[in-house]
């Protein structure tokens, strides 16, 4: 599929969500969810498009998009690691894991590495507290991890495609 | 006013007063010459309830309630100036001053600022919480106005006037918690905004030196306090 | 659909289930899935086919069995055998032994205190039914409570049951359910709404998630009964976007319920109509607060507004709106079915019934539990929880998350109910219960929660926006050994200001973790300040060398 066609397809998903809500202003958050799912992040073009379609002021849409931490205005790296920083994970050693990731991959929480290979995110609780500390690597949950395990697994994860 | 509106009687600071059932404690207090400090409230705009300066004690309720958004009830006993409330108002104001950078001696609204006069009113003598000294930018890209985040108290009066009275909704607020900031459009420089009508309403409802006219220097920026009451009255007359 | 029809569906499903000698249930809730229970299930299915036991043996996915730390869990005929830590390689042996002695090496004794001490009402179906099959739910008297309410009771009679049961809201506040329903019932409005609050904000709690993943129909049924009682025809479930599996199962369950006529127009051929829509949260703790939640459903920034007016009077788009928590709704149909008296017979004088807790932290049996109100903390930690991990020394139990407090050892024999927890400076909260041992530093814990509150503060009101940031900075100084006693006084003063002047519950309770740790672990604060020492060895304190001249 060429670029234009795939763009078209993603737009259609966004349109479908807005249609489902009769293009009401109330559809704003649901629509932003769809944009992020389709495009990976909320870019200015899409924010302007949604603002226009739903008749929501630009500043309001920006206010909403930045209020909710689930939404990101920056493209994500090729791989993502989501470290749980919930209470159960925290007291079972998350600070050590976080600093090990930072040190080994030179990336801060909420940031993407310079080579765009890894985005490090944090979550409040991913519901696997029974397996604390837990981390999600490219969508797969790993529980009862240590700094060594995490560094090793992230290393292998971002190596995989070279 | 339709005749079905009921009248309630209540006590504010030991005075018996009458009120329409849809009035807030603040409105009734003002009608009766009882002063309650406010920062985010402005007649003519929707109430916000964020600054907490207008909190009052209501007999029988352990919680302090914002008078700008609490409607009257029959037999309510309201106190607006107890020692407890006065202490909290002072602390709140200190928190405002500690949050950003307020150096009145170099500020355009020095002498005309509601935050500054509020400090006198609640007898705040010094700030004993640590100053946070954030490094915030000044948006001076607009040809007529300047937005200085260092002086902003996030009361959203500007946002509300821009949306509710001017109808432009150029302004809003981004992020959350201590990071909230006033923004124009998609967080772009004000000068590049395509929606701003340059009406200046935001500048004149802003209680502080955060929004000023370009070129005003220290102590020169007084605000047209009658602008909003005038517009509100004219609009009501049209209806 | 007539009652006969729907009894028949249940009957058919019951027969289908009973037609097999053995039912192998594999936990497919989140924690077990993350330990690859889906692969275990596939392998079991393959083995049943291969070993030619298809006629006697049925494999089913099921909701959380509670003992998540020992997952993936597998049961045979519910209580014939319970296996833990099952790997795909174990499937062959499990199937081979199905009609023989259980596989010893995988077995977890089903009579261990973890199970024996629980009373399951909200979780009655969790681990017993397939959450993706409505027939499973119907086979266990599912939707009968709704049917009975619609066909034999007036709305006020349903409300009366709730009043008599003594059920209180399980989202944290503990507001009496009957009273809230009655307020919404009486509120004047052409349109009314029911909202299920599934935002589950407490970091380290997963009760609501487990219930939605394990028994979504019970929540839908509870909402429909509530809709009938208060006169609402539309419901929303506001659910965290971070819960993909729960969202998927809830969506499927709504579709099934619609198809079977338990949602939609003229439910069970009565005049009552009710539908349920899902709304996704987007990562903001404050959106658990009801007015912020409403703002979020309306597509706005999730900032709270002062109450009154309460949502019961003025909710979504100004219409009277009932908001209850997931666990609250999960209790409704069992109460209607079993009777208010039964429910009220469990628990204490003012806290009736049971409570679900997510037990986590430094404890052996982490997982999901449901216990009668009035049980002691000691029973939860040592009997059900199996004691402290690695034989370490107990230090505190944290309940109520960022709005709660840390309860020290001397209160271990305290009864768990709304009032007792409040007395020791904590709250019941939504059910997060984190056990901490001697390796946790209480200053660090307080700092952790304050960091959470300041980053989740919506920023609308100054005391919370600035106050939580100030408190975090002070706690940071204390933890680094850079604070003085004056900073400690400032901290305590800020706690008071923020608690009493903040707009919503987030700010009003943000100081609780600090206040409770100061109250019970003051020596730890003093050690950081005066001796520049972290007793638990968690905080990094740099000791400045005196400059040598
Ligand atoms: C900051 C804050 C967060 C909250 N988070 C939740 C939550 O995640 N889930 C919940 O059910 N209630 C939460 N609540 C409580 C709700 O506002 C509300 O009281 C509750 O959903 C009512 O349901 P209940 O009566 O069944 O408990 C929160 C309250 C506050 C102030
Ligand atoms: S905004 Fe007001 S308080 Fe702040 S520096 Fe200017 S005059 Fe002073
Ligand atoms: S000048 Fe007028 S239109 Fe422009 S931002 Fe201010 S209030 Fe809005
Ligand atoms: S710029 Fe002025 S009016 Fe706007 S929020 Fe800041 S202080 Fe209030
Ligand atoms: S207390 Fe905190 S979260 Fe609540 S309204 Fe105020 S700033 Fe927002
Ligand atoms: S605290 Fe980490 S998964 Fe819940
Ligand atoms: S004036 Fe009432 S809260 Fe600001
Ligand atoms: S998720 Fe499987 S036992 Fe809890």
Image (tube, rainbow, N blue to C red):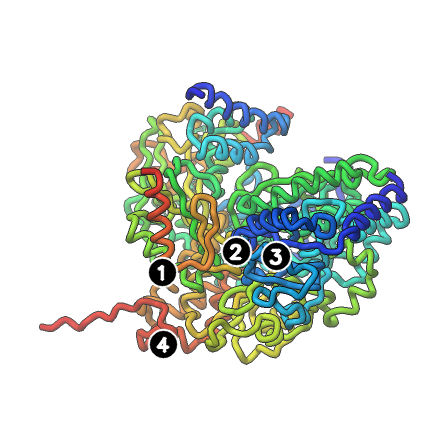
Q: Residue C164 location, x and y as percent?
A: 81, 62
Question: What's the mark number on residue A128?
Answer: 2
* Dot 4 crowding, Cα within 10 Å, few <14, some 14–19, many 20+: some
Residue at disc 2, secondary structure: loop
Mark 3–mark 2 Cα distance, whole angstroms, equals 11 Å
Mark 2–mark 4 Cα distance, whole angstroms, equals 34 Å
Residue at disc 3, secondary structure: helix
Mark 3–mark 4 Cα distance, whole angstroms, equals 36 Å
| Residue receiving disc 4 | C527
Q: How many marks?
A: 4
User: In the figure, is residue B151 to the left or right of C176?
Assistant: left
The answer to whether residue C195 is seen in the rendering is yes
Q: Residue B194 location, x and y as percent?
A: 42, 23
Residue at the far bottom: name it.
C410
Ligand 4: quadrant of the figure: top left
Q: Nearer the viewer, mark 1 or mark 4?
A: 1
Q: Is mark 1 within 8 Å of ligand 6?
A: no
Question: What's the mark number on residue C288?
Answer: none
Q: Earlier in the sequence, mark 2 or mark 1?
A: 1
For the C terminus of chain C, the quadrant is bottom left
The answer to whether residue B18 is seen in the rendering is no
User: In the figure, is residue B204 to the left or right of B139?
Assistant: right
* Dot 1 crowding, Cα within 10 Å, few <14, some 14–19, many 20+: few
Residue drawn at 29 percent across, 40 percent down: A114
Looking at this view, is B38 or C186 the one in front? C186
Q: Is mark 3 within 8 Å of ligand 1?
A: no
| Residue receiving disc 1 | A96
| Residue receiving disc 3 | C207
Q: Is mark 2 within 8 Å of ligand 6?
A: yes
């Amino acid at each position: 599929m060429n670029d234009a066609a795939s763009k078209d397809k993603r737009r259609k998903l966004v349109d479908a969500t807005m249609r489902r809500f009769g293009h009401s202003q109330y559809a704003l958050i649901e629509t932003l969810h769809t944009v992020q799912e389709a495009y990976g992040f909320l870019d200015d073009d899409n924010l302007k498009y949604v603002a226009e379609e739903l008749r929501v002021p630009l500043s309001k849409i920006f206010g909403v998009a930045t209020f909710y931490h689930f939404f990101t205005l920056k493209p994500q790296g090729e791989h993502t690691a989501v470290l749980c920083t919930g209470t159960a994970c925290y007291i079972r050693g998350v600070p050590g894991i976080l600093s090990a990731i930072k040190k080994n991959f030179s990336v801060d929480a909420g940031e993407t590495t310079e080579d765009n290979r890894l985005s490090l995110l944090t979550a409040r609780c991913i519901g696997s507290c029974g397996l604390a500390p837990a981390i999600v690597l490219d969508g797969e949950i790993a529980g009862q991890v240590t700094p060594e395990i995490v560094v090793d697994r992230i290393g292998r994860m971002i190596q995989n495609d070279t | 006013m339709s005749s079905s509106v009921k009248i309630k009687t209540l006590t504010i600071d030991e005075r018996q007063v009458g009120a329409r059932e849809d009035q807030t404690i603040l409105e009734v207090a003002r009608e009766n010459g009882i002063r309650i400090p406010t920062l985010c409230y402005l007649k003519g705009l929707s109430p916000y309830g964020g600054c907490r300066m207008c909190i009052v004690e209501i007999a029988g309720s352990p919680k302090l309630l914002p008078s700008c958004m609490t409607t009257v009830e029959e037999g309510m006993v309201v106190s607006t100036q107890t020692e407890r409330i006065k202490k909290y108002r002072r602390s709140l104001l200190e928190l405002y001053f500690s949050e950003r950078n307020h150096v009145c001696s170099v500020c355009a609204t020095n002498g005309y600022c509601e935050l500054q006069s509020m400090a006198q009113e609640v007898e705040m003598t010094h700030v004993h919480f640590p100053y946070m000294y954030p490094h915030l930018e000044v948006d001076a890209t607009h040809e007529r106005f300047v937005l200085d985040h260092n002086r902003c108290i996030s009361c959203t009066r500007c946002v509300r006037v821009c949306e509710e009275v001017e109808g432009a909704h150029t302004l809003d607020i981004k992020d959350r918690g201590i990071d909230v900031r006033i923004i124009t459009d998609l967080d772009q420089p004000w000068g590049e905004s395509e929606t701003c009508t340059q009406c200046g309403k935001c500048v004149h409802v802003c209680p502080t030196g955060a929004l000023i006219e370009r070129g005003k220097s220290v102590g020169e920026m007084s605000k047209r306090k009658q602008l909003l009451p005038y517009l509100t009255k004219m609009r009501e007359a049209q209806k | 659909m007539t009652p006969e029809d729907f009894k028949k569906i249940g009957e058919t499903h019951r027969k289908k289930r009973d037609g097999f000698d053995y039912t192998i249930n594999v936990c497919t809730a989140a924690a077990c899935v993350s330990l690859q229970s889906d692969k275990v299930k596939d392998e079991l299915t393959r083995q049943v086919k291969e070993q030619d036991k298809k006629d006697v043996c049925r494999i089913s996915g099921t909701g959380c069995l509670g003992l998540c730390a020992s997952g993936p869990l597998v049961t045979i005929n519910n209580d014939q055998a319970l296996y833990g830590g099952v790997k795909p390689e174990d499937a062959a042996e499990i199937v081979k032994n199905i009609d023989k002695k259980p596989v010893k090496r995988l077995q977890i004794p089903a009579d261990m205190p973890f199970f024996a001490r629980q009373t399951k009402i909200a979780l009655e179906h969790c681990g017993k039914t397939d959450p993706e099959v409505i027939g499973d739910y119907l086979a266990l008297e599912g939707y009968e409570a709704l049917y009975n309410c619609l066909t034999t009771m007036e709305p006020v009679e349903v409300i009366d049951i709730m009043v008599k049961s003594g059920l209180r809201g399980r989202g944290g506040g503990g507001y009496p359910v009957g009273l809230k329903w009655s307020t919404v019932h009486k509120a004047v409005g052409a349109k009314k709404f029911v909202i299920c609050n599934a935002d589950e904000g407490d970091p380290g709690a997963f009760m609501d998630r487990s219930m939605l993943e394990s028994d979504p129909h019970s929540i839908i049924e509870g909402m429909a009964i509530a809709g009938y009682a208060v006169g609402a025809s539309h419901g929303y479930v506001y659910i965290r976007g971070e819960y993909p599996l729960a969202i998927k199962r809830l969506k499927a369950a709504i579709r099934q319920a619609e198809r079977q006529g338990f949602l939609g127009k003229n439910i069970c051929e009565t005049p009552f109509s009710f539908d349920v829509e899902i709304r996704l949260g987007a990562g903001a703790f404050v959106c658990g607060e009801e007015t912020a939640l409403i703002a979020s459903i309306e597509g706005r920034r999730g900032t709270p507004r002062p109450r009154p007016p309460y949502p019961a009077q003025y909710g979504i788009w100004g219409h009277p709106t009932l908001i209850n928590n997931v666990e609250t709704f999960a209790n409704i149909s069992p109460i209607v079915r079993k009777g208010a008296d039964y429910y009220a017979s469990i628990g204490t004088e003012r806290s009736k019934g049971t409570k679900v807790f997510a037990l986590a932290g430094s404890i052996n049996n982490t997982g999901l539990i449901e216990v009668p109100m009035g049980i002691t903390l000691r029973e939860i930690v040592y009997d059900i929880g199996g004691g402290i991990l690695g034989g370490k020394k107990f230090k505190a139990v944290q309940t109520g998350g960022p709005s709660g407090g840390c309860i020290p050892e001397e209160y271990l024999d305290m009864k768990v109910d709304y009032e007792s927890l409040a007395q020791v400076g904590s709250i019941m909260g939504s059910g997060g219960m984190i056990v901490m041992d001697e390796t946790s530093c209480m200053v660090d814990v307080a700092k952790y929660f304050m960091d959470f509150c300041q980053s989740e503060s919506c920023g609308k009101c100054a005391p919370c926006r600035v106050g939580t940031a100030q408190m975090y900075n002070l706690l940071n100084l204390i933890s680094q050994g850079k604070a003085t006693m004056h900073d400690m006084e400032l901290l305590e003063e800020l706690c008071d200001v923020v608690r009493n002047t903040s707009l919503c519950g987030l700010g009003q309770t943000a100081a609780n973790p600090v206040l409770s740790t100061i109250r019970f672990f003051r020596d730890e604060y003093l050690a950081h300040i005066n001796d520049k020492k972290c007793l638990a060895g968690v905080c990094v304190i740099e000791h400045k060398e005196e400059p040598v001249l």
